[in-house]
Image (cartoon, rainbow, N blue to C red):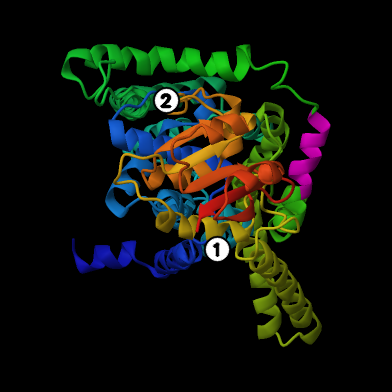
Amino acid sequence: MSSSRVERHLDRTTLAVIAVAVVALVFRLVGLGGRPLHWDEARVGYWSLRYLETGYFSYRPIAGGPLVYVLSRWSLSLLGLTDFALRLPVALFGGLLPLSALLFRGRLRDSETVAFAAILATSPLLVYYGRFARGDIFAIGFTLVALGFAIRLADGEGQKNAYGFAAAIALAIGASGFGVVTLVCLGIAALLVVDHAALVSSVRPVAMQLGTLSSRLEDAVTPAARSVLVFFGFYVFLFAPRAGETDAAGIDSPGTILTAIDVALFESVRRFVGVRIVHRGPEGTHELLPYFGDILGLVALAALPVLVLAVGSFLVDRYTAGGPREIVSLGAYWAGASLVFVPMFTEVSAPWLGVYLVVPLALPAAVGLAALVRWGWSAIEARDVSRSSLALLLAVALVAQAGAVAASDVYGPSDRDNQLAHYAQPTDDFTDFRDNLSSWVTPDDDQPDVLYYGQSMYVSDGSTDFPPVPDEWGERLPVDWYVAREDAQTISATTPTQVRDLETVPPVVIAPATARGELSPMLDGYVATEYETALWGRSVVVFVEN
């Protein structure tokens, strides 16, 4: 590549966005393994470990999208069985997501492009859940990437963008069931923008418009066909089962490849519809308004600068001369549709749902942020003290709010005051259990290493290797991930008699904290410590042989 082409591709805006992405990576990688795993992360870790050990994998909608498990298996195999390795794929993708701002340069000014990247890099919600082993950042991120490629394709930036668009859609769907929801929300937003443009456009004759469309379609037939192949290639790779050491059908077994492809293309859809729609109720249904209020309140607290900038930008853009700009309206409509449909389709009201609003809001917010910077800079150049002071005050307020949330919630302690943490996040004292477990068990011998005690923690052998799993397994989380990664042998007991009848009691006994008084007389010589496995109200007691 010639030096002139390199300069064109690496202009100041591109270099600025790359620098922002580097900062975003640092934000997500610092202390990545410090916080104990949330229950959802522990499920991902546990089933990724089983996938790593056996090579067997089959898509189960209740466990989330397959993309997280595919990437987690690679990461755990390369870097070891650690919390850091489990979260690394999400952190890397979240850190690199600001680079997607470059896809929107055809619709954004240079300053707006950098502002867009900066919001994606620093918004506390995106940072926190960009350090969290779930598929949400992948789902919303790849949807954003798909939008970027679609815009470039519509703007005549090359038909190869169709391949990126197809791949991004498949990856968004493979990341999470919410990938389907956010793609639908984006589709609704795009239809509203197109409809508005059709209403206000002046008017080329209909025959001329249809002729232009027909010409474009003829030129696009081959790229469109290739794009369909790209989509199905990625989709089959993600959703096809892996046989591993079993006799089941798998894409890794030459004799069952066609069956595996059939499962990927058709059975995956049937499972998704069955679990998420047909058989969802009544326990999977809920009132809409409380969930609506939860997600809106979360964004108002944790992403207030983005919300204020986005709303202000949308209103100014819509009701001033020359507006509205399609990119601003698209982001606002996308966020609006998400505000309705994400709370509607979720089964749990959780802070990670906020990412499905923050990313769409980042588009109009970037336009507003860039406008604020330009306004302030012009005031400085004009030596307008009042306007300069006001611009500085607004900038400091926006940065301070985001910084305060990041300091207290993203990198702060996990407790009830942390507005980004979900209930199923263990408190920080659980790190002592995580860090010391390896010294308590000796998995090389044939004796059990860990005893789970109590009816609420009883599960039969092999019943948790793959979803669906018994409800009692949830009471073990996130403990069971840490036990499994040590390759510790486990047994269960539900009554004191069963404990007394054991020939040898394992060196580690884990039970609900309420069973401490019941177990203590039987475990002479053991040291008992209680740990919170949630933000509040869910303690376990761990007896360790002294």
Real-space Cα separation, disc 2 to disc 1, in angstroms: 46 Å
Residue 404 occupies which quadrant of the picture?
A: bottom right
The amino acid type found where label 2 is placed reads Gly
Which residue is pictured at 36% across the width and 14% down the height? 263
Using the image as rendered, state which of residue 497 and residue 2 is in the foreground: 497
Label 2 SS: loop
Q: Which residue is mark 1?
A: 118
> Mark 2: few, some, or many residues within 10 Å (few <14, many ≥20)?
few
Residue 161 seen in the figure: no
Q: Is residue 453 left or right of residue 214?
A: right
Q: Which residue is mark 2?
A: 462
Q: Is residue 152 left or right of residue 241?
A: right
Location of residue 272 with respect to 342 vertically, above or below: above
Q: Is residue 37 left or right of residue 257?
A: right
The amino acid type found where label 1 is placed reads Ala
* Bounds of the magenta segment: 288-297
Which residue is pictured at 64% across the width and 54% down the height? 530
Check if mark 2's residue and mark 1's residue have beta carbons within 8 Å: no
